[in-house]
Image (tube, helix red, strand yellow):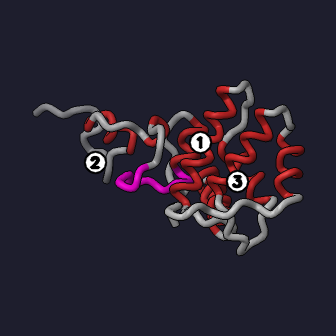
Amino acid sequence: MFCLTGCDDPAPSEPHQDVVAALTHEKGAHQLRWLEIKDKIAPGAWLASREAGREIEPSDPNAVAIRDLIAQADQRYTEGPRMIANRAVQVQEMLSENGVTEQPRSIIAGLVSIAPVGERAGFGETCQHYVTARIQGMSRDEALAALGRQPLPMAKPGDEQ
């Protein structure tokens, strides 16, 4: 009788996400450039995975913290969670191209800090103003203070809810 090592061990219930992605040749969440409607991953887990450079489960404390931050942004801006996450990554990339390093989590937190609940401003439009201020040489705190002193820009028609 032949037996593989550990043959008495119970089989795992489900393969880990990394294994499934490798076997199906799918990109892991941390490798996705954007979060599309068809993607079956929560925006908080996606951003946490991108930060970590590996797959992060939705129940991970970092994913939960980012999910809660995105929910706060959703209460203040017109875009929904997926678009808030995508815009934050877009801002990160635009800033990086101009020598400014800032993580999406920090970008969302900063923009949450300047908008009261129910503001319903445009997140994408606010991001544009933030990027412009940062590229013009303002620090993060200066850019947020400048944005906070004026009414935040309203969403353009057609922005995703």
Please report whichever mark, 2 or 1, sits nearer to the chain's N-terminal start: 2
What residue is shown with label 2? 11
Instruction: Give the residue displayed 74% in from the left and 30% down from the top.
Output: 100
Instruction: Give the residue displayed 61% in from the left and 34% down from the top.
Output: 93
Considering every residue shown, the one lying at the far left of the view is 1
Compare residues 72 and 127 and report the one nearer the observer: 127
Residue 117 part of the magenta-drawn span: no
Instruction: Give the residue displayed 60% in from the left and 66% down from the top.
Output: 78
Marks 2/3: CA distance? 50 Å
- Label 3 sits on a secondary structure element that is helix
Question: In front of the other: label 2 or label 1?
Answer: 1
Q: Is residue 96 left or right of residue 134?
A: left
Check if mark 2's residue and mark 3's residue have beta carbons within 8 Å.
Answer: no
Q: Quadrant of the N terminus?
A: top left
Identity, as a three-letter code, of the amino acid under mark 3: Thr
Marks 3/1: CA distance? 14 Å
What residue is shown with label 1? 89
Q: Which mark is residue 126?
A: 3
Q: Position of residue 133 (x, y in %)?
A: 79, 41
Identity, as a three-letter code, of the amino acid under mark 1: Val
Q: Is residue 45 left or right of residue 92?
A: left
- Label 2 sits on a secondary structure element that is loop
